[in-house]
Image (tube, rainbow, N blue to C red):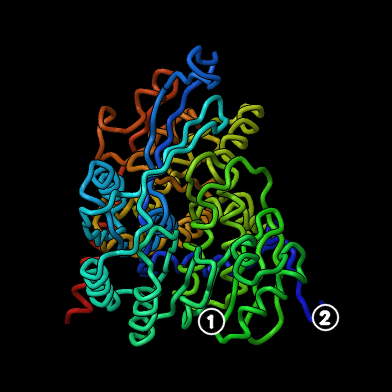
Amino acid sequence: MTGTTTAAPADGQPDAGLLELLDSFHRARVLVLGDLMLDRFIYGSVERISPEAPVPVMTIARTAAMLGGAANVARNVATLGGQVTLLGVVGADPAADDLRAELACLPTIRPELIVDSSRPTTVKTRHIADRQQILRTDVESRAPLAPSIADAVLCRLRAALEQAQIVVLSDYAKGVLTDALTAAAIALARAAGRAVLVDPKSRSFGKYRGAAVLTPNRHELQAACGRDCDTDDEVVAGARAILADDLCEALVVTRGRDGMSIIPAHGEPTHMRTTAREVFDVSGAGDTAVATMALGLAHGAPITAVVSLANMAAAIVVGKHGTATVTAGEIIARLDHADDALSGKHFTLQGVCEWVSRWRALDQRVAFTNGCFDLLHPGHVALLNQARKSADRLVVGLNSDLSVRRLKGPGRPVQGEVARATVLASLKSVDAVVIFQQDTPLELIAALQPDVLVKGADYSVERVVGAELVLQRGGKVVLVDLVPAHSTTGTIERMTAVLDK
């Protein structure tokens, strides 16, 4: 199609603008409204066929529960460092309790759950035997919300808009986003000056009139426009048919292995090819893309940059099993800044493990230390320098934004994980940075098996997380002296005192 732009994968192409955009995520405030779900996974094995009927007999080994639907969009926002208000409807049942328990693990999600005792909490249960899904069962109601419940949703929405920068409508066609409620929600958001991003499931996109961006997948676009949407040209034609009705400002079409396409109401389309290396599970990939776009659009970034990051995030998440999420650290690793001084210092855990193996093959000893490293100060630099002197290589475990907020409260970190990782990686003493989501680095230490574990002298060996693992392998724990009068908390307190004068 004349004028169409095809963007190459961002993999391997340094772009400081994308790093800056990724760094803005921890300042973003997103409001997600839609169909809440709980995804259950039952894992086991099948070794025989039932004598009662020609069906497999599954022996259950373990079960797991994860946030799904609109709740998974919120989870993705939180994992990428953003703050989110999640608004939706649940039943008065144990599944709602399980959903609340999962949300409680994510302190940057503020749940606004309205209980409707007339309907169940939506639950999707997947039975997986030997990595193959053999059955899915659903508990749900697709009935439209009762007027009183819909009014309660809009009341909560109106109050939550003040704190939000962008609104996401996550429509899974489970009865929450009725035509009337959707129209009212978009009107309220527009009146408050908030853009609306919609992940649509309705066959008619007319209910989303007034939204800024719609993000249908290829099949949803095809159903809405009534024509094939396989090739680039067909996707553009189908999107143009929707946009001709002045429905929204742009469509971003997710196309699986063919990547993503941006079709604006005015201007030329752009096609971005996927960067996925392996595809294990597409569950939740659309939620990851929508969350990434919401965070980027909240920053006011150009839609091409936003979709470029979303395309990368979706490519990462389909390489995982289950309803997974992606982290800023994983996206940094995909960006692969090959031409700058930070090359080779941002890695995923898998990448760092590979480098540790190479270093050990060269008889190099590996040290490990960890922390939040918010507002890097002389005390941090001294600790890192001493840690580096204890071995040939130094790996730093960095608490993610989500982890820092769990440990230190909603006002921290001052700097997002991308900025903190970038500063750490610029230090000569640091050979690799790994951002981790857990509250402690125990999993990192178990995977990396460092020769030396380093912490400040304000710890005792018994209190150092992972010390036992390192000592059992014949390694050592080093406690280094701290620089007096230097701490992040103290620095923040002094800054606050100056600002208050």
Image position of 382 with respect to 146: above or below? above
Q: Earlier in the sequence, mark 2 or mark 1?
A: 2
Quarter of the view holding residue 7: bottom right
Of all residues shown, which one is farthest toward the right? 2
Q: Is residue 162 left or right of residue 425?
A: left
Image position of 501 with respect to 355: above or below? below
Q: In the structure shown, which secondary structural element does the residue marked by tag 1 occupy? A: loop
Q: Amino acid at mark 2?
A: Thr
Quarter of the view holding residue 134: top right
Residue 450 visible in the shown view: no
Q: In the structure shown, which secondary structural element does the residue marked by tag 2 occupy? A: loop
Residue 297 visible in the shown view: yes
Estimate the x, y position of residue 453 in percent, counting from the top left. Answer: 41, 33
Picture residue at 64% right of the left edge, 54% below the top: 343
Estimate the x, y position of residue 238 in percent, counting from the top left. Answer: 68, 73
Of all residues shown, which one is farthest toward the front? 52
Task: Pick whichever, 330 or 381, lies toward us.
Answer: 330
Image position of 482 with respect to 236: above or below? above
Task: Pick whichever, 292 or 336, lies toward us.
Answer: 292
Picture residue at 46% right of the left edge, 36% below the top: 126
Q: What residue is shown with label 1? A: 248
Q: Is residue 235 left or right of residue 216?
A: right
Estimate the x, y position of residue 408 in percent, counting from the top left. Answer: 25, 54
Picture residue at 45% right of the left edge, 59% below the top: 172
Q: Nearer the viewer, mark 2 or mark 1?
A: 1
Q: What residue is shown with label 2? A: 2
